[in-house]
Amino acid sequence: MCILVFCSTLISAEFLAAQGLEKVRIGMPSLSLSFIAPQVAYARGFFREEGIDAEIIRIATNVGIVAVTTKEIGYTTAVGAGLRSAVRGLSLKVVTYFNGRPLHVLVAKPEIKSLPELRRKVIGFAGYGDSTEFMLRAILRQAGMELEKDVQAFQVSGSGQRLQALLSGKLDAAIVPPPFNFEAESKGFVRLMSAADVFETSVSGLALHVDTLRDKPGQVKKMLRALLKAQNFIRSHKTESVRVIADWLKLEPGIAQASYDIYVKGMSLNGIVPERVLESDIERARREQQVKDSVPVAKVVDFTLLKEALNELGMK
C-alpha cells in the first residue's frame, strides 16, 4: 500500500513537472459565494490553463493573514483583512477585487424586526480582524450601537457554521453572505440590513506578500489571468456557473440561481476598485486601528499586473 501511495505521489509530481505547472496555495476563509471566482477558475481548469496547480485551502481569516505573511501560503482571498493588515504595517498588498461591494447581510430571528431590537442580543460574526467584524460595527452604528457595549459578540468562523448556529437558536442574529442569507430567509428569518448599504468596498479578491509581487510577477499575472477568465465565464455562462455554485455549496437549484444573480449584479469584471473608494477604505481602517500616519493607496494596493493581464486578455 505504501509503495502504491509513493508511486502515485511520484507519478503526480512527475506529471506536474512535465506539464510545467507551478504549485500555488490559496487561503480561503470559508465556502461562500464571495469566493466563487477561485472555485470556478479551479473547476473549469483556468488555473491549469495558465500553468498553475492551485490548492485552495480553507483557513480562518486571521490565520490566513499570518500564513501569507510568513509565506506558508502564497495568497489569501480575504482582501478586506489583507488591506487592514497592510494599513497596520504588514508586508501585504491587494492585487484584485472580485466585487464592487460586500455581499454580506445581517439576518435575525423572525421576531426581531429592526436594528434597535438587537440590543443585548447575541450576534455572530466570523471573528475579530475579519471583515465581518467591521461590517457589523458599521451596521450597528446605524442604530447608535457598539459591538461590545450594546450587543453580545459571538465569534463563529465559517459562514455555514454561523448559519447553523443561527438556525439552532444559539444566535439571535448573524452576518452571512449569500447563499446563507437566502437559506435563513426561506425559513422565516429577517434581513435587517445589507453590508453594502454601509460598506463601500468588497472584501473578496486576492492579496499577497509584497515579496511575491516583487519576486514572482509571472506567477501573480498567471493567477490574475485565471481569475479574470473565471469572472468572465461566470458572467457569460449562467447555467454552468449556477451548477458550480450548487455543487460547491451543496445548494438547491433555486437558491443557487438566486445566489448567482446577486453575485453577477455586484461583480467586478476588471477587478479594479476606484481610488476614491480605496482611500475611504484605508482611512476607515486607519481610524479603526488607531494608525496615526497617513497611508497612501500605493502602499496597500497595486493593480499594475492586473492591468497588464487585462490588456493581454483583451479586456478593459
Image (spheres, rainbow, N blue to C red):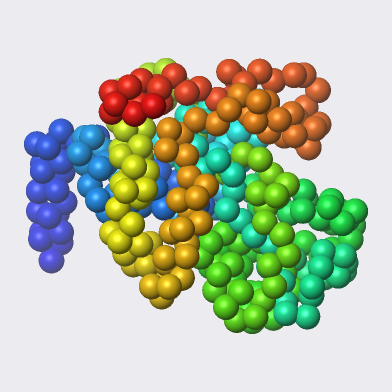
Q: Which of 59 and 269 is in front in this view?
A: 269
Mark yes or no: residue 274 visible: yes
Which quadrant holds residue 254?
A: bottom left
Q: Position of residue 47 (x, y in %)?
A: 27, 41
Write the residue at 83% across / 52% down: 142
Which is nearer the eye, 239 or 120? Answer: 239
Task: Please tell me which residue is depicted at 81% across the width and 68% down the height of the picture.
Answer: 114
* Picture coordinates of residue 296, whole percent (x, y): 66, 18
Q: Is residue 120 above or below residue 278?
A: below
Q: Is 301 rendered above or below residue 256?
A: above
Q: Please provide percent x and percent y for residue 270.
A: 43, 33
Residue 68 in sight in this render: no
Q: Residue at x 51, y 43 (%)?
A: 99
Position of 144 with respect to 275 (left or right) is right
Residue at (79, 73) in percent of width and height: 113
Image coords of residue 39 (percent x, y): 35, 52
Q: In which quarter of the image is the N terminus?
A: bottom left
